[in-house]
Amino acid sequence: MEHVVQQDGCPRVRFTERGAVTAQHARRVLSRNWTGSSTVPSHSLYPHQWSWDSAFIAIGLRHLSALRAQRELETLLAAQWGDGRIPHIVFNPAIPHEAYFPSPDFWRSTTAGAAAGAPTRTETSGIVQPPVHALAAWLVHRADPGASWRRGFLPRLYPRLAAWHRYLTERRDLGGHGLVSVIHPWEPGMDNSPCWDGPLARITPAAAHSFRRADLGHGAAIDRPTDLDYGRYVRLAADYRDRGYHDHGQAETAHPFAVEDPGVNSLLIASEHALAGIALALGRDPAGHLDRARRLTEALIRRMWHPDMGQFLCHDVRAGAPIRERGVAGLLPLIVPGLPGDIAAALLRTATGEHFGLGGSARLVPSYDLRGPAFDPHRYWRGPAWFNVNWLLERGLRQHGHLERADELRSAALTAAAASGFAEYVDPYTGEARGTRDFSWTAALTLDLLAEPEGGTHR
């Protein structure tokens, strides 16, 4: 039996009976987490708007409400800085400061970020997250082009998205090799990945008494980053703030933590291709976006592809050396359109091998090497499986023609999401729920995975 979900004029999405039950539960999660203008990841642990969360949430919302999906992105982009950056948190002024740390009075964006063009009436953080936004905007538009054109969605978002990409490519090429660098472990979204242990070891942590961790009041300490790591996060963020969120200068002096991450750069490439599609729809020349995507792809392969490892590796800009840890970000170039077939095949072999266990020992692809010395199936990004990462890998596998593997991963992700209560992340071996429950991007991406792929390749 099939069931139909339709809202706001969106195209009809058909689910099996089992899928309809899961979709209904996911829809309830997103309804509860909706604030009227955006969606919080979790009311308890993350009570504000997060950058890449909102992009993934919009991708799922497009199957329920084109209007809400558009508003999700519009609300986020309304807090964009004058220099083009999209901050990783947009703070809700109704939420008490003590509910989340670092809070607005730590970031001080309206004053410390004034020279960089921070909004004067909206408090935000000063760092960024991976650039999924143009891809999300393009998918949201395609879900209901009529509603999009009526509201002027693409014409309004295009200049903001283009400015965001310019910020990353022009101000964040700290290594001078044509790739984006992250300057804080929170920026690539994989906060305490073992890939950051080496670069972080250079950072003197902030004094323990200088901050209070709100996250431990909502999550188990064994699931969260350690106090030592958190002290280093705080030090990096405070120093960046005290420099006025200034990005210029050599990485060696301006940014003690500067890393080229394959996941961030792959998402930028995918979003440049999406931005080319948006430009073409608006009657603009897409050549600039396609050229930038090509140059980024060439730099990504030249700088971070390691055939001996069968995957891409992060590169420590300050040390001038690759970080020889197998993080899942090294598989995310599968989402890059036009990635050479031999590299895509090698990534699939690595994903299905002993280090990541896809289709074998692991139910979902873990965030870190199953055989790595720092692997922990429960601690945040040091081993658990995350739904947004597995969604990206499923999309990449499908894009490169590995349809059977993509279908298997899709099925495993849907099973784990429903069984875990839409958990923030899960044990990659058992699927046991970890972190918070009723997590928005898990619910949203579940909706997207439930939608039948177009022509067997893309949704």
Image: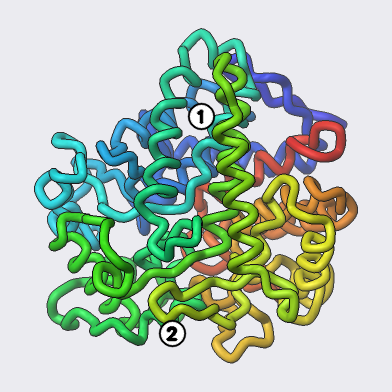
Q: Can residue 27 be seen in this snapshot?
A: no
On screen, 441 above or below 152?
A: below
How far apart are the alpha carbons under marks 1 and 2? 39 Å
Q: How dense is the environment of label 2, judged by Cα within 10 Å: few (below 14), some, or many (20 and up)?
A: some
The residue at which mark 2 appears reads as: 198
Which scheme is used to colour this image of the protein? Answer: rainbow
Q: Amino acid at mark 1?
A: Ala
Q: Quadrant of residue 142?
A: top right
Instruction: State the SS at label 2.
Output: helix
Question: Residue placed at 46% from the left, 78% from the top?
Answer: 320
**Image coords of residue 244 (percent x, y):** 16, 55
Q: Is residue 61 above or below residue 343?
A: above
* Picture quarter with the C terminus: top right
Taking the spot 28% from the left edge, 41% from the top edge, the residue there is: 83
Q: Earlier in the sequence, mark 1 or mark 2?
A: 1
Residue 377 percent coordinates (x, y): 59, 79
Q: Measuring from the top left, give residue 107's x and y in whole percent.
A: 18, 56
At 46% across and 75% down in the image, what residue appears? 316
Check disc 1: other Cα within 10 Å, few if <14, some if 14-19, many if 20+: many
Query: What residue sits right under mark 1 in the picture?
Result: 69
The circle drawn on residue 381 is: none
Q: Nearer the viewer, residue 28 or 62?
A: 62
